[in-house]
């Protein structure tokens, strides 16, 4: 990881960082690979890995990735990534390859994309060097992790779109460009200015956590979480929201006197209105302090850092923190916060609008607690 960051500090990328590596040309795959994996071409190994990725995804993520696997997209990805594998075999050239991929991930997603891109690069290289079906499967599983962290297939679509430049944008490549490039920094700038010129678009829910939650096929910790949330009295919609937004669920017994915190907008009164299932216990609060996002006395020092770590929706501007106290023995549901993608409408002035996307890395910890067990 340090290699990526150090190289990025000194490298400057053209507008489309993958364009350079895609101009080596594309080769057409002919038929399925046969024989032992060790005898396959790099292209066939990459195709086999990509086709295995959906088996490690569920729900919408699985369907969207399967839709990505068209014959042409597979051929483009195989040829492009096989070239990268060949370049990486040259001593000292691997940093250049990594930088090309990282440049695109940074451009589209910022720091969170840079982190997830490491897994994606490693997955392609693992597939290229695979000598068995088991190693192809291991590469597919790693690629699935990156696909989820990067918001399903956006980065892969961007690679396809850059490769097709000069051929006209049609089909999947045209669809990939529906999110305007460069909007992330614009979104963060407007968020920092208290959402000035930034609103939710109409239509489908614009806030989408990156989740592996399938209500028809829950994991053991998700089942435990659902039972805990039902016992706390949350309705079905709130339960589904928590299960989508979190992972690695665990229970934590909290005695009277334990502190809890709620982050929100200036003038926040957590005792009024609808209770929130997204709170901080002492360890999750201290984590924000340790990262320099909030002060020990409860002052927000870095609103964007808080937003990224807690994957907060736009309407929560993280301007203030309110402390509450547990008033009875209770069981809190603790979970790791999943990454999330959020769409916005950006006012460009003169009646013009554009759609912006913000990817939030998550990674913080949230506590869901029976509202009756908290005194604010």
Image (cartoon, rainbow, N blue to C red):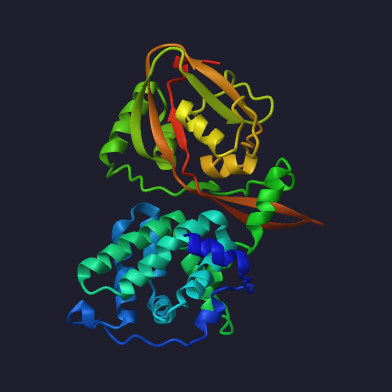
Pinpoint residue 358: horizontal percent, then vertical percent.
Answer: 58, 52
112 or 223: nearer the viewer: 112
Q: Quadrant of the C terminus?
A: top right
Residue 171 visible? The answer is no
Q: Is residue 278 above or below residue 231?
A: below
Pinpoint residue 61: horizontal percent, then vertical percent.
Answer: 39, 56
Q: Residue furthest front?
A: 91
Pinpoint residue 213: horizontal percent, then vertical percent.
Answer: 35, 45
Q: Is residue 231 above or below residue 20?
A: above
Quarter of the image where one finds residue 222 = top left
Q: Is residue 319 left or right of residue 103?
A: right
95 or 145: nearer the viewer: 95
**Figure label count:** 0
At 49% from the left and 29% from the top, the residue drawn is 280
At 55% from the left and 63% from the top, the residue drawn is 6
Residue 88 visible? The answer is yes
At 50% from the left and 16% from the top, the residue drawn is 325
Q: Residue furthest left?
A: 35
At 50% from the left and 35% from the top, the residue drawn is 287
Pinpoint residue 124: horizontal percent, then vertical percent.
Answer: 37, 70
Q: Is residue 92 left or right of residue 304?
A: left
Q: Residue furthest right?
A: 350
203 or 178: nearer the viewer: 178
């Amino acid at each position: 990881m340090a290699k990526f960051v150090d190289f990025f500090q000194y490298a400057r990328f053209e507008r489309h960082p993958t364009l350079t590596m895609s101009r080596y040309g594309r080769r057409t795959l002919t038929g399925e690979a046969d024989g032992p994996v060790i005898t396959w071409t790099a292209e066939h190994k990459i195709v086999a890995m990509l086709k295995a990725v959906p088996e490690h995804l569920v729900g919408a993520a699985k369907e969207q990735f399967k839709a990505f696997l068209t014959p042409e997209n597979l051929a483009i990805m195989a040829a492009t990534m096989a070239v990268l594998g060949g370049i990486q075999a040259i001593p000292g050239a691997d940093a250049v390859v990594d930088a090309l991929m990282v440049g695109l991930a940074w451009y589209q997603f910022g720091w969170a994309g840079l982190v997830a891109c490491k897994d994606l690069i490693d997955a392609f290289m693992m597939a290229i060097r695979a000598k068995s079906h088991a190693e192809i499967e291991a590469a597919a599983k790693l690629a699935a992790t990156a696909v989820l962290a990067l918001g399903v297939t956006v980065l892969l679509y961007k690679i396809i779109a850059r490769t097709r430049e000069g051929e006209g944008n049609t089909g999947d490549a045209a669809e990939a460009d529906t999110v305007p490039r460069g909007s992330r920094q614009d979104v963060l700038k407007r968020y920092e200015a208290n959402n000035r010129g930034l609103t939710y678009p109409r239509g489908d829910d614009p806030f989408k956590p990156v989740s592996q939650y399938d209500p028809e096929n829950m994991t053991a910790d998700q089942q435990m979480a659902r039972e805990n949330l039902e016992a706390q009295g949350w309705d079905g919609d709130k339960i589904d929201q928590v299960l989508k937004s979190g992972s690695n669920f665990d229970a934590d017994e909290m005695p009277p006197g334990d502190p809890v915190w709620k982050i929100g907008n200036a003038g926040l009164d957590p005792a009024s209105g609808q209770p929130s299932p997204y709170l901080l216990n002492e360890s999750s609060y201290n984590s924000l302090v340790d990262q320099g996002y909030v002060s020990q006395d409860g002052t927000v020092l870095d609103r964007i850092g808080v937003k990224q770590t807690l994957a907060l929706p736009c309407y929560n501007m993280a301007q203030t923190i309110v402390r509450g106290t547990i008033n009875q023995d209770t069981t809190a549901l603790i979970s790791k916060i999943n990454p999330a993608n959020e769409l916005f409408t950006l006012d460009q002035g003169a009646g013009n609008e554009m759609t912006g996307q913000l990817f939030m890395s998550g990674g913080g910890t949230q506590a869901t607690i029976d509202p009756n067990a908290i005194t604010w």
